[in-house]
Amino acid sequence: MRYIFTALRNEAADLIRELHLKPADTSLQCYENENTVLTVTGTGPLSAASACAAVLFSHHVTDRDIVINAGIAAAIQNGRENELYVIHKIHDASSDRDYYPDLIPAPGVPEAELITGAKPYRASNTALSFKSDAAVLYDMEGAAVFHAASMFLPPHRIRLLKLVSDFGETGQIQFDPAWSSMIKNAVLQEAERMETVPPHPEKQVPDCAALAQELHATVAMKRRLEQALRYAELAGIDWNEIVRQYREDGLLPSADKEAGKQILERLIYDIQD
């Protein structure tokens, strides 16, 4: 079963039409067919967590199911307007806790970090600084859905997809109908991809400390490397052969951290290709 959570009805509109979802017999705003349950949670972490937990509990989730939280978000740093991102790190501003979805994103879909807060983001009255140059987005539901879903499913069965709608300049966002189509396409593609991964991964990621050292990897780079290698193991991809070829070609060890970043991106691309 696919469980999809959006904060707004507008975000879900094209998914409801495409999948021919019908209103469910529940007090929540749920729509369903034989293999999908879509829930419009409302905005804010409390509404999102409550709705997610209630739906997953009532449907007796199994480890073959997946959860996708999708919707719009504000870009805080280096996010591009109307671009959709797969979230690889989530920071809950209320609890100061970090979460890490467990698989690398699909080819051609950029990554971002996500901050979830209890209030709307306003660039004019919020001062945030970051150590990396990663794209950083802000929403009010992502961490709450991930936390609630984690009580029922492992991290590799949960995904967050966020589309940049604004940069926190104003209090009222005019929803663009094109966003709903972009969200629909991303959700359906990611759902198909997630369902190819076994529910019970037997292989564990080998220790990547030596490879991380060759890349001069930072903590964030090492985390991405671990995600990439774990995905390769689950997908049956021989990443050792790719790394061996890199060494033969003189790409490894890298000259410095900046070169290591480029090689890491190439490695991720080659694993996904």
Image (cartoon, helix red, strand yellow):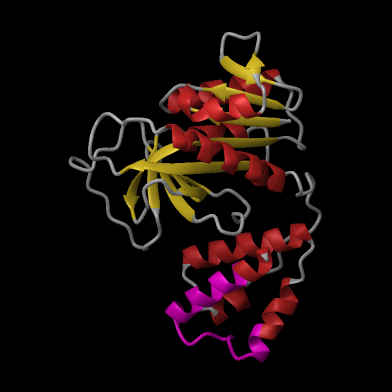
Q: Residue at x 77, y 71 (%)?
A: 238
In this rendering, the answer to whether 114 lies above or below 64 is below
- In this picture, residue 150 sits left or right of residue 77: right
- In this picture, residue 16 sits left or right of residue 130: right
Task: Characterize the magenta stretch by its predominant secondary structure.
Answer: helix
Position of residue 34 measured from the top left corner of the image (x, y, whole percent)? 76, 23
Residue 74, picture quadrant? top left
Position of residue 259 measured from the top left corner of the image (x, y, whole percent)? 47, 81
For the C terminus, the quadrant is bottom right
Find out whether residue 263 is within the magenta segment: yes
In this rendering, the answer to whether 22 lies above or below 36 is above
Q: Residue at x 58, y 43 (%)?
A: 186
The stretch in magenta equals 246-268
Q: Which of 221/163 is in front?
A: 163
Q: Which of 78/81 is in front?
A: 81
In this rendering, the answer to whether 195 lies above or below 111 is above
Residue 154, picture quadrant? top right
Q: Residue at x 52, y 36 (%)?
A: 181
Q: Residue at x 42, y 25 (%)?
A: 43
Position of residue 39 measured from the top left corner of the image (x, y, whole percent)? 57, 23
For the N terminus, the quadrant is top right
In this rendering, the answer to whether 92 lies above or below 212 is above
Q: Residue furthest left?
A: 124
- In this picture, residue 138 sits left or right of residue 11: left
Q: Is residue 146 visible?
A: no
Find out whether residue 208 is within the magenta segment: no
